[in-house]
Image (spheres, rainbow, N blue to C red):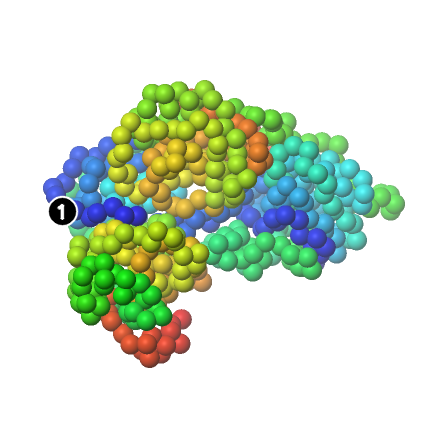
């Protein structure tokens, strides 16, 4: 989860390969870029709009979109080669991609964060490591609009691009046995938000009262790939207030 | 309308066909480790193949049926007894209320599945009744079964009820009875010692040294005790890469064999994370998931390379056999 997120580059040709006998990977080059991300988003939107028979689900990632399929349905009960059929469907879809309208820009999601203190036990450490005052760390962390490249690692956990590199810091040498949900941390050149209580080695600088993962909801993840978000600093009192009102 | 858990066993959870459609939200699939065994069990008791049943791990629970039930026990042989008598696997069993199901030592394999005709009435979360332990959702309150739990099992389907009456009503004496028929034995292979697990090359196969590639196919691996529903951590030859190269996180799936920097491979299983950033040397074929899932901790296995065409052949072959079972049951036993 520590990969640096380099600046955008041009679109890249697509590669197709199997991930076992029930999934196909579409790979768009080797490096992370907003252009690649937009292409992946467009392919996902197109699959939503025109699912082929036997499509189960798909998972977008930094440079890949993995498509899970049911070989029995795709092969029409064993009549045809499933991989060939899926590949054809996907190639056709990719071919039509340039003609598709770009997906709508999603509104920016605001993530209120109470920085430092008990909620951000590593803020001072990060401040010392980066040579920035704690207020400056908070300012730099709340400044950019982050892009959600993908959701993975845990339910609702966003991989974000756009962190100021001056905030980069190594992981903790000794991971914490339990990091609470909502903890906002930094590891390498990435920042993220824990969505479930798990063990974790990120430097924790704050916590959000918002729930990133709500299993009771039809859309269980607060965030999805392609969205943009911004961190908004809040006080401890505001944190408590928001937490009581967070459903 | 229930079943009491007298003793919970080592790890007994409710699993159904799995939580599908939420992987892009980072929600794992869960579901049975040996989905073939659960599907066959469900079909034997007139359920849809993905209905919720119990996944029983190594040391089984003790259950008392508080109402009449039609059951099937599939998967591993964990020395099951019903009212003290040996219980045959892989066939429908009609039990009367008050019967007790208990388990003994694991004779072969490590996961058994108990299917209840009519399924289990626990709420679905994100479209599935499967237990997701780490997030505490699905199943019975998101956790493994405990002593004292009452399992809401509504009882047999109408066709299941008819089979139950056929099997038990003539003689009032026995507390349980089973059918003389059973499914195609290829669907219930029975766990093997040191199975050969067929696999495809993984997307990052070429990143490994030729020696490690050979070792992956030729040498034996042991499933370490650090293994769980997320994955098998294997001990064996250390698998090395030609050069350190950054791998960007991307989606993984059941049966993905990934190799962290330590060189010890991990085979991802039912509770695997949706994405991973380790190079993937192999991918187990779907037709061998059942055999893979039955290798106990300390058990050994080998990988054998097959082509995608072969993998699909065996996938479709297994599907056809299951569908034949389903049709046969509908024609002759659950009309």
Report the number of discs: 1
Q: Is residue A234 above or below residue A152?
A: below
Q: Percent x, y for residue B18?
A: 49, 47
**Residue picked out by circle 1:** A8
**Mark 1 closeness class: few <14, some 14–19, many ≥20 residues within 10 Å:** few
Q: Is residue B26 above or below residue A231?
A: above
Query: Hey, which quadrant is residue B188 in on the image?
Result: top right
Q: Percent x, y for residue A61?
A: 28, 45
Give me the residue at 44% from left, 26% from top: B237
Q: Secondary structure at mark 1?
A: loop
Q: Quadrant of the C terminus of chain B?
A: top right
Q: Percent x, y for residue B268?
A: 45, 39
Q: Percent x, y for residue B256?
A: 41, 35
Query: Hey, which quadrant is residue A13 in on the image?
Result: top left
Query: Hey, which quadrant is residue B177 in on the image?
Result: top right
Give me the residue at 13% from left, 48% from top: A7
Give me the residue at 80% from left, 40% from top: B85
Q: Is residue B217 left or right of residue B108?
A: left
Residue A133 visible in the picture: yes
Q: Is residue A188 left or right of residue B27?
A: left
């Amino acid at each position: 989860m520590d990969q640096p997120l380099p600046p955008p580059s041009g679109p890249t040709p697509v590669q197709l390969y199997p991930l076992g006998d029930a999934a196909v990977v579409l790979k768009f080059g080797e490096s992370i870029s907003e252009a690649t991300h937009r292409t992946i988003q467009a392919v996902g939107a197109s699959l939503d709009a025109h699912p082929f028979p036997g499509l189960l689900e798909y998972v977008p990632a930094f440079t890949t979109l993995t498509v899970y399929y049911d070989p029995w349905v795709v092969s029409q009960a064993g009549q045809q080669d499933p991989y060939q059929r899926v590949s054809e469907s996907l190639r056709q879809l990719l071919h039509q991609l340039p003609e598709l309208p770009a997906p709508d820009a999603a509104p920016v999601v605001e993530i209120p964060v109470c920085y430092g203190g008990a909620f951000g036990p590593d803020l001072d450490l990060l401040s010392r490591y980066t040579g920035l005052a704690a207020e400056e760390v908070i300012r730099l962390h709340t400044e950019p609009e982050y892009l959600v490249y993908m959701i993975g690692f845990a339910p609702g956990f966003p991989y974000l691009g756009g962190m100021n590199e001056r905030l980069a810091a190594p992981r903790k040498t000794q991971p914490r046995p339990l990091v609470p949900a909502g903890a906002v941390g930094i590891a390498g050149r990435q920042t993220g938000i824990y969505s479930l209580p798990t063990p974790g080695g990120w430097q924790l600088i704050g916590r959000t009262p918002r729930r990133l993962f709500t299993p009771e909801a039809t859309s269980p993840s607060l965030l999805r790939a392609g969205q943009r978000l911004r961190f908004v600093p809040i006080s401890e009192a505001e944190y408590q207030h928001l937490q009581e009102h967070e459903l | 309308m229930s079943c009491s858990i007298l003793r919970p066993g080592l790890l007994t959870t409710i699993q159904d066909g799995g939580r599908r459609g939420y992987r892009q939200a980072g929600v794992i699939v869960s579901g049975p480790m040996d989905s073939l065994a659960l599907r066959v069990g469900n079909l034997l008791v007139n359920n849809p193949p993905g209905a919720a049943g119990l996944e029983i791990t190594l040391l089984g629970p003790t259950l008392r049926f508080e109402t009449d039930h039609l059951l099937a026990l599939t998967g591993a042989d964990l020395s099951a007894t019903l009212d003290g008598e040996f219980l045959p696997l892989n066939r429908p069993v009609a039990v009367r209320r008050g019967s007790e199901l208990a388990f003994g030592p694991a004779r072969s394999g490590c996961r058994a599945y108990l299917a209840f005709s009519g399924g289990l009435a626990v709420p679905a979360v994100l479209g599935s009744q499967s237990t997701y332990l780490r997030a505490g959702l699905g199943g019975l309150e998101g956790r493994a079964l405990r002593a004292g739990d009452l399992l809401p099992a509504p009882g047999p389907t109408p066709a299941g009820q008819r089979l139950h009456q056929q099997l038990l009503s003539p003689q009032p004496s026995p507390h349980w009875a089973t059918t003389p028929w059973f499914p195609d034995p290829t669907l219930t292979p029975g766990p093997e010692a040191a199975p050969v697990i067929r696999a495809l090359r993984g997307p990052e196969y070429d990143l490994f040294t030729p020696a490690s590639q050979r070792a992956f196919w030729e040498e034996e691996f042991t499933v370490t005790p650090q293994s769980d529903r997320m994955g098998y951590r294997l001990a064996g030859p250390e698998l090395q890469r030609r050069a350190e190269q950054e791998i960007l996180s991307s989606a993984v799936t059941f049966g993905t064999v990934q190799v962290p920097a330590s060189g010890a491979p991990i085979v991802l299983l039912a509770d695997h994370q949706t994405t991973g950033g380790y190079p993937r040397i192999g991918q187990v074929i779907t037709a061998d998931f059942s055999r893979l899932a039955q290798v106990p901790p300390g058990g050994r296995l080998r990988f054998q390379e097959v082509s995608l065409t072969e993998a699909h052949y065996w996938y479709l072959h297994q599907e056809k056999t299951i569908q034949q079972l389903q049709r046969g049951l509908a024609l002759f036993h659950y009309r």
